[in-house]
Image: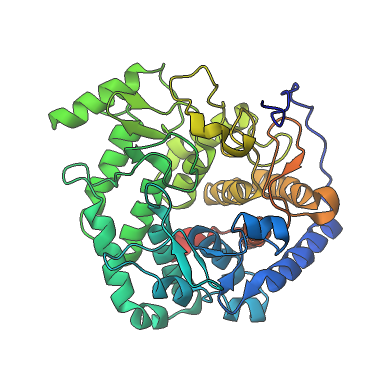
Amino acid sequence: MRSRRPAAPSTPPVRAVPDDAALLAECRARATALLEANLTRHGMRASTANPQAAARAYTAVFARDAAICALGLAVSGDRALERRAHVGLQTLARHQAANGQFPKFVDAERREADFWYLGCIDATLWWLLWLAFVDACRGGGELRARYATQVERGIAWLQAQEHQRFALLQQNEASDWADIMPRSGFVLYTNALWLAVKRAYRLPRAAATRAHFDGLLHPFSAGSHEYRRAKLLAEWAARGAKEQTLYLSFVNFAFAGFEGDVLGNVLAIALGAVTGARADAILDALAAHGVSRPYPSRAVCEPVRERSLLWRPYMARHGQNYAWQYHNGGSWPMIGAFHVLALVERRRHDEARELLRALAHACRTRNWSFPEWLHGRTGAPRGMRGQSWSAAGYLLAEHAVHARRNPLRAAF
């Protein structure tokens, strides 16, 4: 029985959001307080501790959550938080696998690491970016020197996942942040992070990675491919739909994702993988899709429906990934934060400020619950309360808007 799946009503009208300095100031203060409460000696908990969070492991230190939180801590302007932005690196490093992979999360109390069902590819990427970002903000290389061995092993593990001709990372299905979505093969989100890691650590073949990032994940505008296997993949991907502005969420053999991965596209802009007129066209397309209504920003433009060839039975797990929910169209304040950074990167400052105000309203729902996600049509808060990366994402976005500068591009 699917009683937990709500009907999807029509999208509510966009509410006018006043430029309320008091709202932004309160959101900042509450976000700071939440992060102070959730930051332990082992690292940042994914959400506020309570029995429900403990049952779902949200009290553990997740590599991707803690890394994104560290971005917000490092530019928060709160000296106590800035000094602790690195906390959690050691917890994850202590549980790094012998082959160099970092775990999806560590339950510090049980001293137990989890690497997910099919392996978690983005934990290692985020750990490396976390370290590089904090070092850049502090103006030194202390962390790179301290963790040189772990950095070397993590990079070696990632390079073992890199296709030898395409120079893109390959991954299993459901093995990145959207871990109950059917993305596999060459994934937009993952390879946007990989390009940033390559820049941050001056790794080889960055130009090849960038070229195939465009050629495979946006095959509509790509030129002819010399390598026959690249040509075949691009033809399969482009055949699946009419030409579109957004990058595909993934490309695999005879399959591709046309749902419009919002996080993957805005991260690609915020991290510098996509620039110029194409980046502006993506932001225009996202606005046309209304991905920030009623709150910023939806995970996808169009959900994967149950009748789709891409639907998987596991997407119904916990009743979460039906249309307009969770990874399949829910609105995530964390995604909204990177959306703000993408707008700042393109110097669209008025739009960025407007989105920041909407982000504060999302965080304020249910008496400042800082929800994990909200229903993509109704705006009803869902998931865990007191989500750390919702709070940290707000601080990161606010910093970018006020500084009129994208801190990710400055660091990478």
State the residue at coordinates (48%, 25%): 311
Placement of 10 over or under 356, stated as above or below: above
Q: Tell me the quadrant of the picture where the C terminus can be found.
A: bottom left
Place of residue 329 in the rendered image (x, y in percent of width and height, measured from the top left): 60, 33
Q: Tell me the quadrant of the picture where the N terminus can be found.
A: top right
Quick check: 383 left or right of 142?
right
Place of residue 192 in the rendered image (x, y in percent of width and height, measured from the top left): 39, 48
Placement of 119 over or under 33, stated as above or below: above
Place of residue 30 in the rendered image (x, y in percent of width and height, measured from the top left): 78, 64
State the residue at coordinates (41%, 31%): 248
State the image quarter where residue 154 is shown: bottom left
**Which residue is outermost to the front?**
1
Quick check: 121 left or right of 12?
left
Residue nearest the observer in this picture, 283 or 277 = 283
Residue nearest the observer in this picture, 257 or 13 = 257
Residue nearest the observer in this picture, 183 or 133 = 183
State the image quarter where residue 348 is shown: top right
Place of residue 29 in the rendered image (x, y in percent of width and height, measured from the top left): 78, 67
Is residue 87 at least partly visible in the picture?
A: yes
